[in-house]
Amino acid sequence: MTVRNKELSFEKREELLNTLKARFEKNMKRHQEVDWTHVQEKLGANPEKLWSLYQMEETGGEPDVVGYDEKSNEYTFYDCSAESPKGRRSICYDREALEARKKHKPENSAMDMANAMGIDMLTEEQYRELQKVEHFDKKTSSWVQTPDHIRNLGGALFCDCRYETVFVYHNGADSYYGVRGFRGSLRV
């Protein structure tokens, strides 16, 4: 996903890099064989990705490196906040669901926010991978990308982790709750 003409000021860039580095060093179990120097080089060469990471950070996602793909030479960042990012809650699934609500519309949708931030919403498979790294969403839940056949019938999927187990649920795509948001991913 490409975000154009989105650059951070020098100060915000340095602050974000320091935050990401400190989180990276504090949570080495998430990326044991990854060297921060290489991650920082990739970020320096991709300012639009740094802008997206800033959006993830600003909405409470606490992004961190969770993988490296040797074939594509890309690092994968996921939101690693303990609970679904606070700045991305109380939203329905997508634009269609948002427009379908007659009353009490939320301010936004998960898919619209992800697109605006230049990130992808996690799939169910990615959500399960993340939970193998560490348990997240013990009190909240997160929308995940929903297969078309479910979405076409008006539904959407969300996940949480209770009792050290990932649970997948369904709801109307137009529903929204104060404890449901979404987690994103970004490849750099």
Image (cartoon, rainbow, N blue to C red):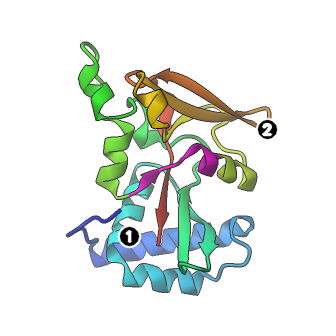
Residue 49's mark?
A: 1
Q: Is residue 55 left or right of residue 63?
A: left
Residue contact at pointers 1 and 2, CB within 8 angstroms: no
Question: Residue at the location (72% across, 52% down)?
Answer: 134
Taking the image as drawn, is residue 107 in sight?
A: no
Q: Which residues are magenta?
A: 119-127
Q: Residue furthest left?
A: 5
Question: Residue at the location (74% across, 52% down)?
Answer: 132
Q: Secondary structure at mark 1?
A: helix
Q: Position of residue 173 (x, y in %)?
A: 41, 25
> What's the amino acid at mark 1?
Lys
Q: Callout 2: few (<14), some (14-19), or many (20+) C-alpha neighbours within 10 Å?
A: few
Q: Is residue 124 magenta?
A: yes
Q: Residue furthest top?
A: 103
Q: Secondary structure at mark 2?
A: loop
Q: Position of residue 137 (x, y in %)?
A: 63, 38
Question: Residue at the location (36% across, 42% down)?
Answer: 111
Disc nearer the start of the sequence (1/2): 1
Q: CA distance from mark 1 to mark 2?
A: 32 Å
Residue 164's mark?
A: 2
On-image quarter of the N terminus: bottom left
Question: Hey, which quadrant is residue 7 in on the image?
Answer: bottom left
Q: Position of residue 64 (x, y in %)?
A: 57, 63
